[in-house]
Image (tube, rainbow, N blue to C red):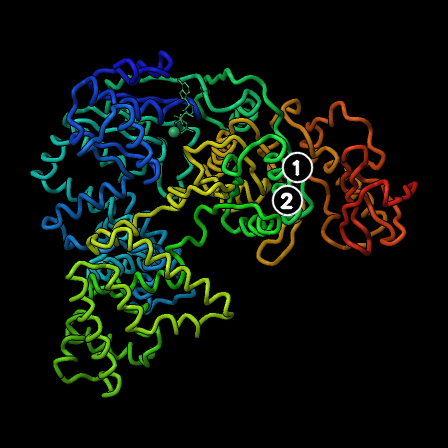
Amino acid sequence: MTSLLDGLNPQQREAVTAGTGPVLVLAGPGSGKTRVLTHRIAYLVGEMGAYPGGILAVTFTNKAAGEMRERIESLLGGRLGGLQIGTFHAICARLLRKEAPFTRLRADYLIYDTDDQLAAVTQAITELNVDVKKYRPRQLLNAISAAKNELITPAEYQAPGYVGEITRRVYERYQELLVNSNARDFDDLLLDAVLLLQTNDELRQKYQRHFEHLLVDEFQDTNTAQYRLVQILGNYHRNVFVVGDEDQAIYGFRGADYRNVLQFRHDFPDARVILLEQNYRSTQIVLDAARAVIDQNPNRTPKALFTERGGGPRVTIYEAYSEVDEAEYVIERIVELRRQDGLSWGDMAIMYRTNAQSRALEEACIRRKVPYRLVGGVGFYTRREIRDLLAYLRLVHNPDDAVSFSRIINVPKRGIGKKSLEDFRRWAAANRLTISQALAALADGVASSLAGAAARKFVEFWQMLTNWRALAAQGDLIALLEDILTQTGYSLHLHETSDTEQEALERQENVKELLALVENDRQRPLADFLESVALVADVDSLAGSAEDAVTLLTLHSAKGLEFPVVFITGLEEGLLPHFRAFDEQDGMAEECRLLYVGMTRAMQRLYLTYAFRRMTYGDSSPGMPSRFLRPIPAQLLEGASALLANQRAAHRYQQDTTWDDAPLTQPESPVRRAIRSQIAPFGGAPALRYKAGVRVFHGKFGEGIVLESRRSGEDEEVTVSFREGGIKRLTASFANLVILED
Ligand code: ATP
Ligand code: MG
């Protein structure tokens, strides 16, 4: 079985072949932690004779779970029945379904996503007569989520003051609404699983004995609920194998706490601690630059990390004029890298701090016809029409699902307005009827407070729903979905509610895609289908797409991944570090780790860009380079010096001329000055005629200032900001620019 240990260095082998008992692998990015975990599972089965069904492995995404399973099966040369790999959420979801009789919900419970949650919390707020303007649903939801991740139930919830009391009440009501709809939100999956195991001795012992081996990847990002699960399940056999890197903890905002690593050492004092020191992913330059960034964080344990992947190209810094210029620069480089270096689109990734930043990048991709794949954002399952149809399916599955009911009771329009819906709700509540009971009662002719016409419409809806439930019972998902589409006249609705014919067609395409998706698996039980849909995470949209495309993703989604070329955009104060982090404890340190995670995804080339001006919320504000760039040693960097230098000149020029009263005139910050002083000048290239910052005159465009100039073959390509004509990119030999002396 030597092949299991092939391609592993001595420390990695030590971890893979460690005997039983707790093991903690702490190591930097790209050092093979995930690889070690994968080989460890194969080794447990192949060498130590472990029973696959008794192994539970936790990964950070469902996609990673799929890849890991494949890898293990290929190492062992066969399929592994029973082996459980998945995210904490997926594992808990399964457990709660299996043990439903011991929980407060039925096995066919639904999983609410953020939109459903917001709808439920808003309903709770309205019912409690709380002012929605003062207590925003999203904020309350965050507070509820934080409580759940700390394993605090509504009954235990205590927070000071009036706000705390409001939150407690909303939490309580919200939770009732979910239970009435036989639904759980994401946090409930963890919370309920932990509560179940804590309170039910028999079940706890069953699972503790069942899972002989427990393995966790990205351990630094576990929250309290997840940690408790590890603690409980691992407490009997104590074969808990966790790998992580405190410097890559980036989910603090969701309650993750890297101090769980300390807690682990406390709970498992006999744990064998293994350090891996060789990075196999990145070049020395990338690693050195990343280290300079992470070294800024106080209180971290420095880790040794070396690579044999020699120097490599320097990290390129680019200062863009605007987010549009930034996007153009990035896409241009990508096109060039593909043409010159033979890289494929899929070798390259563009990362950013917030989803909203993807728009300019997407537009540039479209302009340059560069295929791209967007991770997260408005994903397939969050599109309006898909959500509608899923709501139908969910209501068929569970006719008491209040959120789905509200979503589609009048979509497509069937004459049930807000008022009728309110009347219906009130009447049902007064008579203590669930949605389906109330509908059935109306259908049976029970007298209600509803107007006759309104009551009839609800009855018609109930009849459709009953037919669909019968169809669903026959087990053919496609037939069901097609019937829903026809009965509701959904295509007509698409056309009526789209702004343009083009939009209608696109939405129609989405519906077809859903049908195709269901077609693949048409005999699958509806419950299964809905669960798999609910558990799809952002990063999972990467799975299975064979198409060669550039990946656009947030830094948070980039965990665990690697790409030959990485662009990190928007490196500005307020964006990265994000302004929200400024007044949060550990906020700044977490932002720093986030950049560190991004940088260490790069195998060969790394680009860091920031824009001088960026439209945020329709407002263009001047950007300051991120403070995290400051400590990167100049000799690791290239580029941008022209722009940076010119900015100083532009700034001076501004003060002299004041032909634009944009807030450029604010005093130069020490940050900017420090960064500038550290950035290396271009090395070796012949001198350029039009230096950045120089004032020039053009026959047609008039007076302007050079923003950037770069060599382009024998010629020079000059970017000039004209006083009247805006920014133009010109070829020097044609442009006949006259340099104006100061
Ligand atoms: P991260 O902290 O970013 O999750 P990691 O520690 O999990 O990183 P891996 O993703 O497991 O690191 O490994 C990084 C890369 O190095 C992968 O491409 C992996 O295949 C490769 N690698 C790991 N160990 C070795 C080795 N001993 N020989 C060759 N390649 C290796
Ligand atoms: Mg990893």
Amino acid type assigned to the residue bearing label 1 in the image: Tyr
| Label 2: which secondary element | helix
Q: Are marks 2 and 1 in contact (CB under 8 Å)?
A: yes
- At label 2, which amino acid type do we have? Glu
Quickly name the residue at label 1: 318
Q: At 20% across and 61% down in the image, what residue appears?
A: 397
Q: Is mark 2 within 8 Å of ligand 1?
A: no
Ligand 2 rendered quadrant: top left
Label 2: few (<14), some (14–19) or many (≥20) C-alpha neighbours in 10 Å = many
Q: Residue furthest bottom?
A: 452
The reply to whether residue 651 is in sight is no
Q: Quadrant location of the C terminus?
A: top right
In the displayed image of the protein, which residue is found farthest to the left?
202
Nearer-the-camera pick, 359 or 73: 73
Q: Does 428 sit left or right of 295 as displayed?
A: left
Residue lying at 36% horizontally and 52% vertically, measured from the top left: 142
Image height check: is 567 above or below 287?
below
Location of residue 318 in the rendering, given as x and y in whole percent from the top left corner: 66, 37
Q: Residue at x 54, y 49 (%)?
A: 357
User: Residue 555, position in %: x, y?
Assistant: 48, 39
Identify the residue under disc 2: 326
